[in-house]
Image (cartoon, grey):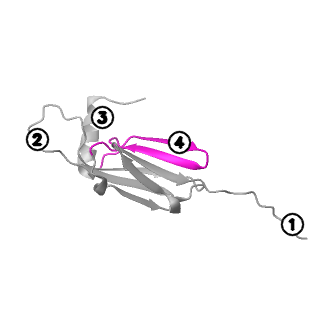
Amino acid sequence: MLLSTPTVRDLERLTTRVFATREAGARLDAYREDDTFFIDIDLPGVDPASIDITVDGKVLTVRAERKRTDGEDRRLVIAERPTGPFSRQVVLSEKLDTDRLEARYDNGVLTLRIPVLERKPRKIEVTA
């Protein structure tokens, strides 16, 4: 259930200002095709040079910043398009080879491509 009461929206605005991040501004899809895991993250209007991707253990963090374009400094009556820094974290499976992670930014979508590790069952011998 999505909470969207005025109180919740006010709290979200306050925490966004305090922590200077926006998780809601970076929606994603995650899927697997054959031996590759993909994560598509919407980052419209973001300069690719501002995108920072890190993997610490199995936690993937994507940080970026969307700045207002020229002419957007006017006093807005409605401001629904997020600006400023935001981040998104995803806990990855141990079955993913994060050392070979590839990133591509195209048409406002960051696509992360992560190969799935091949894990073959191993036979364990019992000794007496």
Of callouts 1 and 2, which one flags the residue occurring earlier in the amino acid sequence? Answer: 2
Residue 3 vs 24, above or below: the answer is above
| Amino acid, disc 1 | Val
Amino acid type of the residue tagged 3 in the rendering: Val
Name the quadrant containing residue 60: bottom left
Nearer to us of marks 3 and 1 is 1
Q: Are marks 4 and 1 in contact (CB under 8 Å)?
A: no
**For residue 28, which quarter of the picture?**
top left
Three-letter residue code for mark 2: Gly
Which element type, helix, strand or loop, lies under badge 4? strand
Tag 3 residue: 8
Q: Nearer the viewer, mark 2 or mark 3?
A: 2
State whether residue 107 is above or below residue 64: above
Relative to the observer, which residue lies in front, 59 or 37? 37
From which residue to which does the magenta span run?
Answer: 21-45
Label 3 or label 4, whichever lies nearer to me, is 4
- Where's the C terminus, which quadrant? bottom right
Say whether marks 1 and 2 touch (CB < 8 Å): no
Residue that appears at 29% across and 40% down:
12
Q: Residue at x 27, y 39 (%)?
A: 11
